[in-house]
Image (cartoon, rainbow, N blue to C red):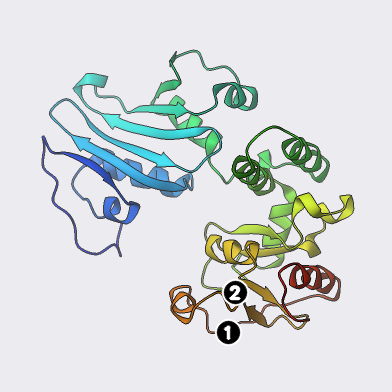
Amino acid sequence: MRGYGAVPKLNKGHIMSSMQLNDFMKINGFPIFETAKELITKYELDVRYIRKWTTEAVTSAEIHISHPFVKHITIGRGPRYSGRMRIAVCLKDMSTFEKLYGKLTKKNSSTYVRYDEEGLQMLQNIRVKTELDTELSDSQLIAETDSVVEGDWSATDKLALIKQRIGHSSYARKVKARAGNRCQINSVITRNLIASHIKPWAESELVEKTDIENGLCLSPNYDGLFEDGLISFSDDGVIIINQMLSAREMSAYRLTGKETINVSTRQSKYLRWHRRKWGFHS
C-alpha cells in the first residue's frame, strides 16, 4: 500500500509493542502483514491499534478493533501452524456473538480459532459492511434495532450495535445510492460511508426510522461531527459550524464553512429538528 510515509524497519526475531494503523501500514516485506492489511481494508475493520511480532516460529499481527463483541483478531503464519494462516478472534461477549453467528466448535476460553477459509468467514461475519444479499429489510431493521435500544447493553455498545444494524440494511443502501455513493460533504470520499440519521433512531417516530429523507451519506469523521452537533445544515444545504469547533480543527477536517449539500423539501424538517436540538439558530 502507498501513501503512509517512511517504512519502519522490522527484522526477524523482533517483537514490538502496540502501534497505530498508519505505522503498521508502512511495514513491508512480511507476507502475513500484507495479508493483514488486505483484510483490514476488505472487511473495513475499525482498528484501534495493532500489536505485531515476528520470530522464527511465527509472524503475527494482533489487530485490536472497536466492536461490540470482539476484542481483537490475530492473524499469523509459521511452522507452528503447519504453514497455514491462523485467524483467532478474541471475544468480549461470547453469548451474543453465538446468538448472532451460531455456535463455533473450536474455542479456547473466549478465543475462537479458525484457519484459512473458515477464519475469513469469521471476519466476514464481524465486519461493519455487508453485501446486498445479507441486508436487512425495513421491517427487520426496525425489529432488530428496537430490540437493541430496549436491551441492557451499555450506551456505547448500543450505539455501535445500532450503527451496525443500519449499515446492514436496505435503508443504508438507499441513502448511499441517492447520494451517488459519495460523501455529501466531500464527494471525493467514496469508501467507508455511513448512512447517518439526521434525527437519531432512538428519538424517531416509527415512520421516520426508515425514511430516507432522514438520512445523510457521510464519511465516518463527518458523521461523528454531525452526530455530536458540531456541524449542521441550513434548509438550503449550507453547512453550519458549531463555535466549539476551532479553526485548527476545521482545517484538520478540511472544512471551510462554505460546504453545501443537496436538501429536499421533506428533508428540511429533519434538519430543523437537528438545529434545534444542538442550539443552532434557524
Q: Residue at x 82, y 54 (%)?
A: 204
Could you tell me if the residues under marks 1 and 2 are in contact, i.e. CB atoms within 8 Å? no
Q: Quadrant of residue 186?
A: bottom right
Q: Which mark is residue 114?
A: none
* Residue 30 in the image, given as x and y percentages of width and height: 21, 42
Q: Residue at x 44, y 42 (%)?
A: 65
Label 1: few (<14), some (14–19) or many (≥20) C-alpha neighbours in 10 Å: few
| Residue 121 placement (x, y as % from top left) | 50, 30
Q: Is residue 22 left or right of residue 167?
A: left
Q: Secondary structure at mark 2?
A: loop
Element type at mark 1: loop
- Image quadrant in which the C terminus is located: bottom right
User: What's the amino acid at mark 2?
Assistant: Ile
Identified by mark 1, the residue type is Gly
- As drawn, is 227 to the left or to the right of 253? right
Q: Relative to 156, say whether 117 is above or below.
A: above
The location of residue 40, given as percent across then percent down, is 41, 46
125, above or below 209, in the image: above
Residue at point 67%, 58% (across, down): 195
**Residue 129 in the image: above or below residue 73:** below
In the rendered structure, which disc, 1 or 2, sits on the residue that comes first in sequence? 2
Judge the density around disc 2: few (<14), some (14-19), many (≥20) Cα neighbours within 10 Å: some
Q: How many marks?
A: 2
Where does residue 57 sit, x and y in percent of width and height?
16, 25
| Quadrant where the image shows the N terminus | bottom left
What residue is rendered at 81% in x and 75% in y?
264
Q: Which residue has dot 2 on it?
A: 185
Task: Return the residue found at the far bottom.
Answer: 258
Kindly indicate the quadrant of the structure image that contains residue 106. Answer: top left
Image depth: mark 1 or mark 2 in front: 1
Front-most of residues 271 and 230: 230
Q: Which residue is the site of mark 1?
A: 257
